[in-house]
Amino acid sequence: MTKHKLKSLALGVAAAALMHASDAAAACSSLINVAVSPSIANTASNVVAAFYNYYPSASYCVGLVVYADANIASDIVSGGSTGPYDLFLSDSAVYPYDLAFFYSSLVSGQPFPFATDTLDLYSSANTPVNISGGLPTTGIQPFKYPDPSTLDPWGLAAIQVLYSKWPYIQALENGIGTTDPNTVAVYADVEFSGVAYGFTAKSQVCNNYGGGQVYEVGSYHYEYEFGRDYFTPIEWFGVAIARGQTAAQETELTDFINFLTGVGTTAGTAALQQTCLQIPPQP
């Protein structure tokens, strides 16, 4: 894995109409805007590129917007039936279900799962520490984990791991373990700011091309197991937004969701698996 995984796109608010690579000047037959959590940005770019390759002659365009979940939800609610987004892809079920329950007129259909991620402990090749056996119980160095108070799914998983053993609890009480706002920020601190290691998303640090999982050469990682080490699933959810789409936009949105969830083709799920995600069964 190379350091290009951390894109400026994932660090703040970004919006771009991602055009067909084969013809960037092609007119859009329709445009849908997809809002995604920062932790999903890199994977979403893979999916959009694969979507264009799968529909080379459709002249589909996708505006990809990276924003914090709370801000995306606020935009949807304040925008009402003319809001800015056609689809919301989140790194948890919280906001999609909140919208579906409290603002049902603003969503189309029910939230749906489309990927499952994993909690990894990661140490960069820049300042490598051998944590291939997991967080050490002695000589723990300062480390980072996502803030669980924001309901970050990796933060919730990490705090379950940390409260499982007394040395980890003591490390938290002594301020050795501190929080970052999200998993992307943890990855940035470990990769670029000299933090010894941190709890982050497997999808941030792992690539999978041709069936083999690859991490940055010289780095170390330890993968925690759902159901053994932590019990809050790290499952990504999407929800379609009802905002008076045109017939062409409805068609593109349906095609995109089907592509994402593996209906009719595995090209979309293969794009998800490029960042080492697992694909949940669809209802």
Image (cartoon, rainbow, N blue to C red):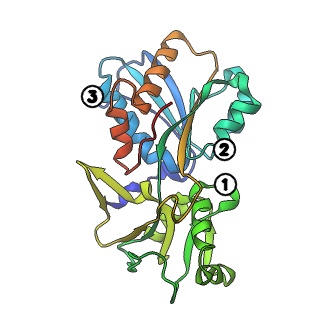
Q: Earlier in the sequence, mark 1 or mark 3?
A: 3
Q: Report the front residue among 189 and 198.
A: 198
CA separation in Å, label 1 and label 3: 40 Å
Q: Quadrant of residue 133?
A: bottom left
Residue 60 location, x and y as percent?
40, 21
Q: In the rendering, which numbered label is found on residue 151?
A: 1
Identify the residue at horizontal 45%, vertical 37% (top origin).
281
74 relative position to 50: left or right: right
Of residue 195 and residue 116, the one placed in the foreground of this image is 116
Give the vertical position of 67 relative to 167 (above or below).
Answer: above
| Residue 18 in sight here | no
Q: What is the three-letter code of the residue carrying label 1?
A: Leu
Quarter-of-image position of residue 205: bottom left
- Residues at discs 1 and 3 in contact (Cβ within 8 Å): no
Q: Of the residues under marks 2 and 3, which one precedes in the sequence?
A: 3
Asked whether the residues under the numbered discs 2 and 1 touch, taking CB atoms below 8 Å apart as contact, a structural biologist would say: yes
* Residue 147: x %, y % from top left: 64, 63
Q: Amino acid at mark 3?
A: Ser
> Residue 37 sits in which quadrant?
top right
User: According to the image, label 2 marks what residue?
Assistant: 94
Q: CA distance from mark 2 to mark 3?
A: 37 Å
Badge 3 is on which residue?
22
Q: Earlier in the sequence, mark 2 or mark 1?
A: 2
Q: Secondary structure at mark 3?
A: loop
Identify the residue at the far left of this view. Answer: 210
The spot of residue 156 in percent (x, y) is 62, 60
Q: Which residue in the rendered view is the most extreme toward the bottom?
A: 139
Residue drawn where x is 32% and y is 65% of the image: 216
Residue type of the residue flagged with mark 2: Val
- Label 1 or label 3, whichever lies nearer to me, is 1
